[in-house]
Amino acid sequence: MTEVKKIIKWVIKWESGEMNPDDEAKFFQELINSGQVWRLQGSYVRRAMQLLEEGRVMLGKKGHYDYYGNYVPSRYEVKAGTEGSPQYFKRMKKKLEEVI
């Protein structure tokens, strides 16, 4: 399956509410890594921000510009331990595992 077809399949699955939380995190991590999420409609950007706050995803390996020209930093450009950083992601993942 081509990358475009995979993304389209995931978009349909997410928008129809059929995506489980783990697949949702993988989907949004791919969108964040590629920078695509920052150019999509607001619901995608808002959900990406929620997932970053929850520590279920992290910022991409490189920074990107959003639809309005604002710079979104990479996971290495934010302060260690803050939302979007690898350290925050690991800490929140550990908390989630303790709950489960």
Image: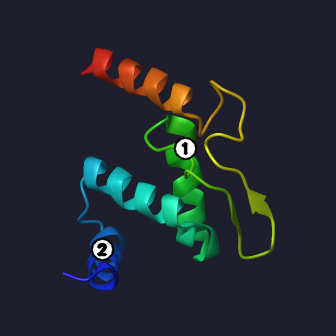
In the image, residue 82 above or below residue 98: below
Whole-percent x and y of residue 19?
Answer: 26, 61
Within the image, what quadrant is residue 38 found in?
bottom right
Tags 2 and 1 touching, CB below 8 Å: no
Question: In the image as oriented, which residue stretches furthest toward the left?
Answer: 1
Discs 2/1, front: 1
Image quadrant in which the N terminus is located: bottom left
Badge 1: how crowded within 10 Å, few (<14), some, or many (20+)? many
Identity, as a three-letter code, of the amino acid under mark 2: Ser
In the image, residue 70 above or below residue 54: below
Which of the numbered marks, if any, corresponds to residue 100?
none
Q: Is residue 14 left or right of residue 57?
A: left
Q: Nearer the viewer, residue 9 or 42?
A: 9
Q: Secondary structure at mark 2?
A: loop
Q: Is residue 44 left or right of residue 90?
A: right
Say which residue appears at 71% left-offset and 37% top-offset: 78
Q: Nearer the viewer, residue 8 or 71?
A: 71
Say which residue appears at 47% left-offset and 21% top-offset: 91
Whole-percent x and y of residue 33?
Answer: 50, 59
Q: Which residue is mark 2?
A: 16
Q: Nearer the viewer, residue 18 or 45?
A: 45
Q: Earlier in the sequence, mark 2 or mark 1?
A: 2
Q: Is residue 46 left or right of residue 69?
A: left
Within the image, what quadrant is residue 13 found in?
bottom left
Say which residue appears at 37% left-offset and 51% top-offset: 25
Whole-percent x and y of residue 61?
Answer: 55, 50
Q: CA distance from mark 2 to mark 1?
A: 22 Å
Q: Secondary structure at mark 1?
A: helix
Image quadrant in which the C terminus is located: top left
Q: Is residue 33 left or right of residue 93?
A: right
Which of the numbered marks, if any, corresponds to residue 52?
1
